[in-house]
Image (tube, rainbow, N blue to C red):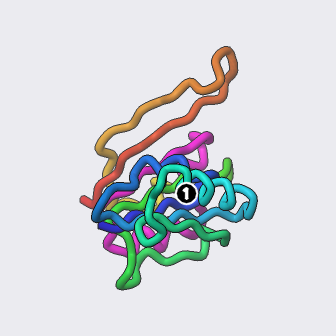
Amino acid sequence: GRVWDLFCGVGGFALALAAPGREVLGVESSAPAITGARDAARLMALPAEQVRFEAGDARVLDPAGDDGPDLLVVNPPRRGIGELAQRIEACEVPRLLYSSCNPASLAADLERMPSLRVVRARLFDMFPHTDHAEVLVELARA
């Protein structure tokens, strides 16, 4: 299978999803974060043909191509995924994991992807005693 981890940061999701027979691509706008992700992949002895990290704008990628993913992971900044939601809606990617630090942008993005249904969601209290939390939502094509 093929996994794209968009807005991957230092590669936490991508590295966790790396497995034999699975191609993982992580994309992040921060070049230093990509350097960290590549360093971590090397330390984990992950083959370069299995896990690849690229610096770039994840918002402009189109998952509809022939080399598109079977699983798409997004962990965007507070503003959400914006126009990428329309491209995800238009493509045939069967599963999406959406990690969000902003429930309002998450709700707006999910509204733009009506063919994806919530399978499960989980709240992570990463910042105790504050009103900040992370939400991880698993979605599947209806």
Kind of residue at disc 1: Arg
* Magenta residue check for 133: no
Residue 20 position within the rendered picture, expressed as x and y whole percent measured from the top left:
30, 60
Q: Quadrant of residue 34?
A: bottom right
Q: Quadrant of residue 24?
A: bottom left
Give the number of callouts.
1
Residue holding disc 1:
42
* Magenta residue check for 95: yes
| Residue that appears at 67% across and 15% down | 129
Left-right relation of 61 to 113? right
Q: Is residue 64 above or below residue 109?
A: below
Q: Nearer the viewer, residue 109 or 42?
A: 42
Tell me the magenta residue range.
Answer: 81-108
Residue 92 appears in the rendering: yes
| Residue that appears at 54% across and 75% down | 61
Query: How many other residues sit within 10 Å of disc 1, few (<14), some (14-19) or many (≥20)?
Result: few
Question: Which part of the image, by quadrant, shows the N terminus?
Answer: bottom left
| Residue that appears at 51% across and 56% down | 74
Please tell me whether mark 1 sits on a helix, a strand or a loop.
helix
